[in-house]
Image: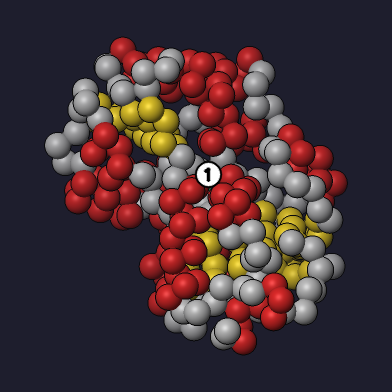
Amino acid sequence: MNEKACQPIGVFDSGAGGLSVLKALRAQLPDEKLVYVADQAHVPYGPRSLAEVRRFSEEITRFLLAQGVKLIVVACNTASAAALHHLRAVFPQISFVGMEPAVKPAAEYTHTGVVGVLATPATFQGELFASVVERFASHVTLLKHTCPGLVDQIEAGHLQDDPTRRILEEAIQPMLAQNVDTIVLGCTHYPFVIPLIRDIAGPQVRVIDPAPAVARQAGRLLDAQNLRRVPSQCVDAGPAVRFFTSGSPEKMQRLLPLLSVQPGPVEQLCWQGDRLITV
Ligand code: DGL
């Protein structure tokens, strides 16, 4: 076993959305230790400029590297759109798994030729989205919606209430009127409202959550680099997941069970200018 294999995997998002990816990682790679960073001081990332999100992502990556992580999962479509190329160029010593809206499987699956994509404004602006559309979806009609306010609702733990339903109805009903049969969740927060999305869209519409595919890709990268953690060969240092937030640890702590994530201690991070530090 490679000696780095005992090290944790770093995972980050603007907030709690990346926990949808963390759950898939826990399910598929149960022997791995994880370090999760939620940049809740800056959530939502979606309405921010790509340059700003790139700055945050670079500093979070520095923090994760200082924790000794062996792989970084950018569990945020917005940060991937803004920063993935940049992070790979600036930090060649580590591999990144990023996210892009799952337009390819959607374009393969659709029978009506109409695919809905729910993602943040910054994700739609990024080159990554333009490039997946050009490569895989030039023959389908893509209906995009940014679901304003939805990330905030999910951060507040309001997964089922009326305002959340209204945001989703506004996004999905016009898509249904245009015969959509596949909806891509292009933001890692949105899998937490899948029950509501299914309720509005009905059983004939397929909803694509990319989290399991992202976890599979993380597993493939670990295998390729001989970095899978073998518990019997590692000193067991601490909890399965270390959670960090630049927002309120108490709030994050309360959110974890609402999102069906096994709770654990949440540690405080602080932005000091452009630096992210522990307190
Ligand atoms: N969860 C994120 C994403 O996948 C970010 C949402 C936000 O902060 O606006 O895009």
Residue depicted at x 62% and y 87%: 3
Q: Position of residue 40 (x, y in %)?
A: 68, 50
Please determine whether, in this image, residue 142 is positioned above or below residue 137.
above
Q: Position of residue 200 (x, y in %)?
A: 48, 15
Label tally? 1
> Label 1: how many residues lie within 10 Å, few (<14), some (14-19) or many (20+)?
many
Q: Quadrant of the C terminus?
A: bottom right
Please determine whether, in this image, residue 89 is positioned above or below residue 181.
below
Q: How is the image coloured?
A: secondary structure
> What's the residue type where badge 1 is placed?
Thr
Residue depicted at x 53% and y 62%: 73
Residue at the front extreme? 232
Q: Position of residue 233 (x, y in %)?
A: 69, 81
Instruction: Find disc 1 in the rendering and name its residue.
Output: 188
Q: Secondary structure at mark 1?
A: loop
Residue at the bottom extreme? 3
Q: Position of residue 126 (x, y in %)?
A: 36, 52
Residue depicted at x 46% and y 40%: 209
Residue situated in front as seen by the camera: 143 or 3: 3
Please determine whether, in this image, residue 38 is positioned above or below residue 148.
below
Q: Is residue 91 visible from the viewing direction of this image?
A: no
Mark 1 residue CB less than 8 A from any atom of ligand 1: yes
Q: Is residue 36 visible from the viewing direction of this image?
A: yes
Residue depicted at x 52% and y 59%: 74
Q: Quadrant of the N terminus?
A: bottom right
**Is 272 placed left or right of 194 in the picture?**
right
